[in-house]
Amino acid sequence: MCPSSQKPITATDEPEFFGIDHYGFPRSGHDDPADPTEYYPPYFRSEHFQRFGYHVQQLRGGFHWVTSGGYDAAFVVTDDGVVVIDAPPTIGENMLTAIADVTDQPVTHVVYSHWHTDHIGAAAVYGPGVEIIAHRITRELLERFPDPLRPLPTTTFDDDHTLVVGGTTLELSYRGENHCPGNIFIYAPAEKVLTAIDIVSPGSATFMHCDASQNITGWYEAQKQVLSYDFDFFVGGHHMHFGTYSDVQACVEYFADVLDGATAAVERFSRSDALLSVLDGGGWDRVFVGTENWINSMANFTTKYVLEKQTSDGRLWWERLAGVTSQTKYHAYTVLESIRLERPRPNYRLSGENPPVFLT
Ligand SMILES: [Zn+2]
């Protein structure tokens, strides 16, 4: 296509819709940060939190949740010591302070959810005498990339491991690679608390690019695995909130919409006639699709789909989850690449056929 034959893009081509600005970035349509006001919990504005930078809260029984606002972790007070889950550096030594706020018991056991520094990079704070339990792959990664602030696990497992300390049970299980290799589910059956880190973040659309996850298809599978547990409280690693079952369902619904929009985008933008209509047409296709490369064109298409979608309770996504207007485009990009790389080939060209067929 000769550039001179393209129609110039003018301001009048800008369509009236809620969604994406000239540069392909989502916009909320109003001036405020487009987060639901309930996203910011009362503790966030408390004098204690603003002074010390952490908040600790009993979920049920001995199970406690600790947050720095951006990151969260947990500990369980038992009759024979404290079992800690993770050690985010942003909480750091405040994990010990939070534990001391509620018990005089020493930390005896530490569970690593996964090997990432941002969730266990302060684990040395628990001292050298603790038992550290993690998946075998987590130990292998920490042996390969040593870090004195992330001491090696002393106990590892492959599939399932039941940890019983002082009458409290934690069921640890590994269902395969998702966010990263070795990332485990940690379930407290008596307290009905599930900890699964970097899968969904209650109340929000989580960090960009599906929380920097590696196996996106496994990460989507893990969302369903989370919902298969019987839990009242969910600890996701981020941010501001622990979650209820319905909080997790909302996040899973949001990412299902991202996948739906991305799938529709791949189908549409694999057609050469659709590309011609973008090149020769005007309006939204030219401004928000035709000025981008192929993947970003599809990311814009996906973002528009998600931001304009009426969700299951009648609201738009940015009215339900924090970060939707700023993160959706990045999630769309990552999910689009995962369709291209991980899922059964969606556009398989038969001899002499155009467009490609979509195998299901
Ligand atoms: Zn992680």
Image: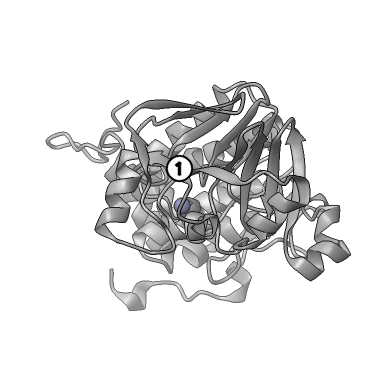
Q: What type is the residue that disc 1 sits on?
A: Glu
Q: Position of residue 245 (x, y in %)?
A: 68, 29
Q: Is residue 290 left or right of residue 346?
A: right
**Residue plotted at (47% across, 76% down):** 8
Q: Residue at x 76, y 67 (%)?
A: 52
Instruction: Tell me if residue 269 can be seen.
Output: no
Q: Is mark 1 within 8 Å of ligand 1?
A: no
The relative height of residue 81 versus residue 18 in the rendered view (above or below) is above
Helix, strand or loop at disc 1? strand
- Indicate the position of residue 71 as horizontal and vertical percent values: 61, 56
Answer left or right for 331 relative to 247.
left
Asked where in the image residue 173 lies, by quadrant, the reply is top left
Q: Quadrant of the N terminus?
A: bottom left
Which residue has dot 1 on it? 131
In the foreground, 338 or 273: 338
304 lies left or right of 176 = right
> Which residue does the image show at 70% across and 27% down from the upper left?
232
Quadrant in which the C terminus is drawn: top left
Q: Residue at x 78, y 64 (%)?
A: 30
Q: Quadrant of residue 234?
A: top right
In this picture the colour scheme is one colour
Q: Is residue 293 visible?
A: yes
Counting from the top left corner in percent of width and height, residue 4 is at 35, 78
